[in-house]
Image (cartoon, rainbow, N blue to C red):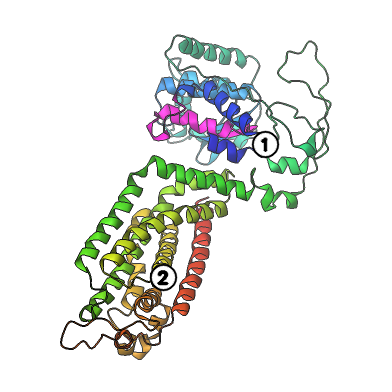
Amino acid sequence: MHFAANLKIGPHMSSASKRERVNSILQAIGMYETRNTHTGKLSGGQRKRLAIALELVNNPPVLVLDEPTSGLDSSTCNQLITLLKKLAMEGRNVICTIHQPSALTFSMFDHLYAIADGQCIYAGGAHNLVPFLGALNLHCPESYNPADYLMEIATHDYDTDDERQVDKLIALMDNGRNDDYRQSKSARVAQLAAMKKVEQMMSSGLITPVTAPVMSPGPLPSRNLNFKPLTPINELSSRIWDSQTGGMTSESEGNCCKPKKKKKPRPTMPSIDLDPAHLCKRENIYATPFYRQLSILLLRTFLLIWRDSSLTTMRFGIHLAIGLLIGFIYRNIGNDAHHSLNIFRYIFYTIMFIMYCAFSGILVKFPLEFPIVSREHFNRWYSLRAYYVAITLADLPIQIICSSLFIVPTYLMTNQPLELWRFGMFFLIVFMTALVAQSIGLAVGAALSLNLGAIMGPFFICPFLTFSGFFLQEKDAPFYLRWMFDVSFLKYSLDGAMLAIFGYDRERLECNEMYCHRSRPKFLLKDLDMERANYQMALFFLLGLLVMLRILAFYIMSFRLRLFR
């Protein structure tokens, strides 16, 4: 709730006012006692109420809900619809789709719009449905719920060989253009009776009491000091409204909810000259600026990691455990010429392990968060750019720790050269490889589903692995395949790591045998076809590939979100 408030309410409201609003909403919907409960531990009805509460944070004049009662029992359904009814009675427009509501729930609706076969079969007050059907000789039995009876007609249960009842409803309703069955004043009595019945259930303890939260408008932006909303609902919580209504005044400054002593002419609402081109500007789409979105998303990401630290701890533990194992296997070989090829294998394994762990760790991140991101992004909580930068920055410290937990013990246990600049070069090239692998995993995860990405993901690494220079050297490859070595990021990574350990005029390795051909590091690099390798070129290639893949992953995410919409 605080996360939604900080993103959906502009900077014109203080943090204290936002906290006060969150608490008032939670109290109104009967969830203040469970305010410290994780969302995953809430019941179905509580989750529905929480979803509504998230939309109420910025006090919108219109609420659009998709099947809010699905999966709820009858009492919880009555509780939820009562909350929506109270919100509507305050002046909000509440639009929701609903399937087979109970009679009590159905009686609370002001207006019903029913569709069958893609056409409108009824548009009007809920209490006018029975007279409407009676006019077509479709008499609803007294023991029937009118909503159920209409559903049976819509599913052609009462059709004959010569006549379709749906066609009669469409013709009389003129496909929704007939407004003779709109809500009448007499229907209010039945609605109040239905709400009174639910209120009695709440007062007796059968249902958790809910009410419409009281929204304080909060301080307005300084540039709109003369403007006051016509109702408490038309709150200046959006930067779109702020940028379009500067200097407006209204004579209707009183509270619309106060009882009127005598009827007065309705004041003329001030005209608003909205510029569509100005509304479409990026800075007017979201209530909070980019830097604020980024800081909030980073805070949420680290908070989620802290709350569910088991996966992160396991990730750290795996890197440390495998690092100690590899260090024990290749112990004290770092300066032994007889084990020069084993040093080469150790370097390759280090690159492969760090690379695959980084790749697989990010591969499922976006597919798992896609439903949440799509909802929050299209509700204009934050931009995709802010989310993308946040997930990129949030994983950097974790990746640094994971790489350190593997590289530091193995580097020391294998007795590699104890020169800080060599260790820094080795760590940097391996870490850059991990970031490139993360970028590939992010692009694959954004393009494919969770199951398909888990299966197909490793196959995107295989071509780079084949032409890495470990299994086949470039000089031994067919001439028409040698270009593959020039685009394999693992080839550049292996070259850079080998140069960090054996390059830059390293002294001869110790030889405890009769003859060690590879005691001179430059001979080893020549045998491995790395004598022309360049560390700076490898580093810049990885950096350029990293930037290109990050941009590609961003546009794949953007395309998938638009396709989902």
- Which numbered disc flags the more N-terminal residue, 2 or 1? 1
Task: Classify residue 232 by image quadrant.
Answer: top right
The one of 531 and 387 positioned closer to us in this rendering: 531
**Residue 527 screen position, x and y as percent:** 29, 88
| Residue of label 2 | 429
Question: Are there few (<14), some (14-19), or many (20+) residues within 10 Å of tag 2?
Answer: many
Query: What residue is at 26 percent from the left and 69 percent from the top?
Result: 414
Q: Residue 548 or 260: which is nearer the viewer?
A: 548
Q: Nearer the viewer, residue 152 or 272?
A: 272
Position of residue 485 in the picture relative to residue 31 (left or right): left
The mark closer to the camera, 2 or 1, is: 2
Q: Is residue 156 magenta?
A: no
Q: Secondary structure at mark 2?
A: helix
> Relative to residue 258, is residue 515 depicted above or below?
below
Inter-mark Cα distance, 2 to 1: 47 Å
What residue lies at 40% left-to-right and 49% top-to-bottom?
368
Please provide the residue range marked out in magenta. 34-63
Residue 485 at x, y percent in the picture = 38, 81
Label disc, if present, on residue 434 of the rendered structure: none
User: Is residue 140 visible to us here?
Assistant: no
Q: Is residue 380 above or below residue 81?
A: below
Q: Amino acid at mark 1?
A: Ser
The answer to whether residue 116 of the structure is visible from this angle is yes
Q: Amino acid at mark 2?
A: Ile
Residue 455 position in % (x across, y down): 31, 60
Image quadrant assignment for residue 77: top left
Task: Name the element at disc 1.
Answer: loop
| Residue 123 horizontal/vertical position (percent) | 59, 30
| Residue beneath disc 1 | 237
